[in-house]
Image: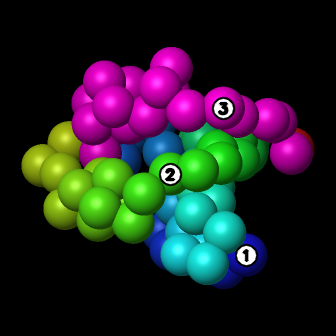
Amino acid sequence: MERKKVSSSQIRSVGYEAGSQTLEVEMTDGTIWQYTRVPSEVHRRLMAAPTIATYYRDNIEEDYSRKRIR
């Protein structure tokens, strides 16, 4: 999955695959988390958020199933 670099002190890049509703979040330490069943609207709001890390922490991190892929 292709991830786009974002301007955040805690998140390096974000990728999204609409067909499978899969979201990948690469942290600045290199860890990559993959979330499943994330609606495209959540991804859109994440990318538009004034503070991406805050939106991620408040709306994604604990709300969706995830696995560490790196």
Q: Residue, x 58% and y 63% (percent of image)?
A: 21
Q: How crowded is mark 2: few (under 14 residues within 10 Å), some or many (20 or more)?
A: some
Q: Residue, x 33% and y 53% (percent of image)?
A: 42
Name the kind of residue labelled 1 in the image: Met
> Could one spot residue 28 in this view of the protein?
yes
Q: Is residue 12 left or right of residue 57?
A: right
5 or 66, nearer to the observer? 66
- The residue range painted magenta reads 52-69
Residue picked out by circle 2: 38
Q: Residues within 10 Å of mark 1 (few under 14, many from 20)?
A: few
Residue picked out by circle 1: 1
Q: Residues within 10 Å of mark 3 (few under 14, many from 20)?
A: few
Residue picked out by circle 3: 65
Return the residue found at the far left: 50
- Residue 50: x and y in percent read 12, 49
**Is 8 above or below relative to 56?**
below
